[in-house]
Image (cartoon, grey):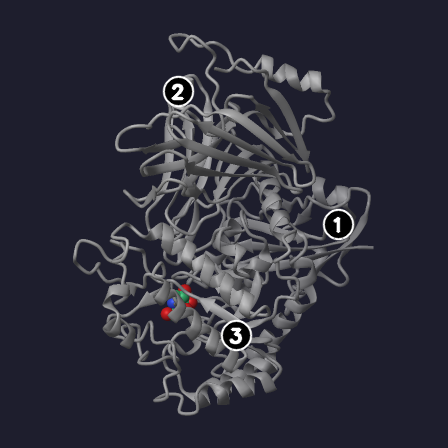
Amino acid sequence: MTTAPSTISHLRAAGVSLVLELPAHGLPTVLHWGADLGDVSDAEVQALASGAVPLLDNSVDVPVQVSVLPEGSAGWMGTPGLEGHRAGDDWSTLFTDTSYETDAVSRTITARAIDAAAGLALTTELRLTDSGLVMARATLRNTGGGDYALGRLSLALPVPQAATEILDQAGRWAKERVPQRRAITVGTHLRENRRGRTGADAATVLTAGAGGFGFRAGETWGLHVGFSGNHVSALERATNGRTLLWGGELLLPGEVSLAPGEEYATPWLFFAYGDGLDAQATRFHDYLRQRPNHPTSERPVVLNTWEAVYFHHDLPTLLELAERAAEVGVERYVLDDGWFLGRRSDDAGLGDWSVDTDVWPEGLHPLVNRVKQLGMQFGLWFEPEMVNPDSELARAHPEWIMQTGGRMPLEARQQQVLNLGIPEAWEYIRAAISGLVTEYDIDFIKWDHNRDLVDAGSTVTHRAGVHEQTLAVYRLLAALKAEHPRLEIESCSSGGARVDLGVLEHTDRVWASDCIDPLERQQILRWTGQLLPAELIGSHVGSTHSHTTGRTHELSFRAATALFGHFGIEWNIAKITDAERAELAEWVALYKRFRPLLHTGTTVRIDHPVDELWAHGVVAADASEALFCLALLSRPSTWPPGFVRIPGLEADRRYRVSAVGPRAALTTKSNAPSWQGGDGVVLTGRMLAAVGIQAPPLQPEHAALVHIAAE
Ligand code: DGJ
């Protein structure tokens, strides 16, 4: 039993401390995860351990240690971190004989423990990244005889009782990442995802926070599960007030059964602490930007053909679009759905990844050649994990369709899921895509995934196959990237249903939503930004009348909204007026001017007391410049909205504050604030934070841009 002494480890980075107790027999236990404790001595940190765990009333006779893998054997009566069994036995674990390895450079502690009686070995890795995120992962190995049926392997970090409110996200198609907030009570706030993809309703970042926490202030502790298949995130508060934030993959019954010697690894879990939601978001953004595979080239202006032509592929129209695109400054032309065999609508063709010569007698060459001549990159749409029953592929290989129970799953969008866990199916798709990438010198793939996985079993293993499917997709993305190192890939899934840090290990941006209505997009971008920095979020200017909502918006609101992402156009710009094209070109130029700032700076979202006025922006890493958007979403009950405080700049620096953007100067309006006229005004960073700037006289569903530049 636990008689050997524990050691204490104190990891610090970017304003975060992670204090771990590392017992010689047992699993790492978090004594503190939160604000930096400063440069404290070993003895002082040790004091945290001695005071940490009281003996509880009416409980087991020793203090209950809740490790990162909570165990029932320790007296934890909540959800255990490991659920599984070996033909009914070995269902409760007690991991001991722990060895530790510390990598000081990456601030990683790896713990290896065994449960000899249960025939299991567990490795847990805990890492404090340079940006202050805690990354955690566990690997379970079956060291016993006979198969071990795994139900769940999840990891938990404690949250102090100071957290009283929970905020996470929900959503649906074309309305992704809707925030939802409520008080924390005893019990479990459980967000399960069984869609076989990340989901438009994913929790994304499940956050517990001190009462009233906002963007700029209030302690928050959040969890993101970096996985694109079924997953779970939860906040659990026990009757004694102990509160755990936990998550992992959600395994279907029988989905993972470990034969002797086999192992299972959880996805990476990302735990983010921050004083305010912006601080939390910045940790994710900085982490992503520090990855070696983060896109470093300037994010090219995109033209995507989907809302411009849908399935009506015809060469003259698409060439005309390419000409107009190049004229307004587009740098990447993406041919969306509709180019491959039999694909005249969404009810046929998926799986048959060859160019349809009925529509494209000379292949895609005439279009690709012109696009490249015009100096643009070429991108192409695929939906590699799907197959239409009406396709050559489905007719040849019905057994490659994911299914169970001797029946075909219900169709969704007239399609089924191709089982990429079958090596031959995986290789067929890899070869088809890779061949086209080579033949057409494709720079970019829009990788779509348009249905939930229903009855997603394998005809080969006769087991549920979501776990294997998810890993097979990652392998496929990685293989294509390895073969074509310049290739960029977008993660799209009925819009924004695959936004997670698992898929982003292999992709270069996400498509945030099929809704390009800027009013909706303000919200979608704001909350997608809780996880991702602007350069990873595809953000397009749609047509004047939104195809998904029917609302009408001026170009200035559409473009000022799209600016704060990876900017693009999804609008038939061959059919608009010269004046509209000229204004669009100005917006494209503005994006090109500001993208170095937008794609490296720090996100600031302002807690303005008038709910209808949304103010957000990006401040340069050296605080020399900032660009803010003030958007009025609807008519407030009081008017005017008053001063908007702008935090994030250097207090003692002087900044010129001015309007920017096509038709930005509202000087003709007598009630326009002074910063919108002439050369603007000069204010210090302290004045901007403490007083702010007067909100302009905006109409609802309009926005103004504010440029702030150090003098
Ligand atoms: C769903 C995507 O989100 C859209 O942008 C478009 O690519 C369609 N699929 C095409 O079928």
Position of residue 59 in the picture relative to residue 222 (left or right):
left
Give how far across and how far down residue 512 sits, in percent.
47, 58
Residue 668 found in image quarter: bottom right
Frontmost of labels 2 and 3 is: 2
In the rendered structure, which disc, 1 or 3, sits on the residue that comes first in sequence? 3
Q: Secondary structure at mark 2?
A: helix
- Quick one: SS at disc 1? loop
Mark sitting on residue 73: 2
Along the line of sight, the residue nearer the viewer: 288 or 6? 6
Q: Position of residue 350 (x, y in %)?
A: 33, 72
**Residue 483's image quarter?**
bottom right
For the residue carrying disc 2, how many other residues have a C-alpha within 10 Å: few (<14), some (14-19), or many (20+)?
Answer: some
At x 41%, y 79%, the residue is 309
Residue for badge 1: 623
Residue that numbered label 3 is attached to: 303
On the image, which quarter does residue 629 sit in? bottom right
Residue 634 visible at all: no
Q: Amino acid at mark 3?
A: Leu
Q: Is residue 577 left or right of residue 456?
A: right
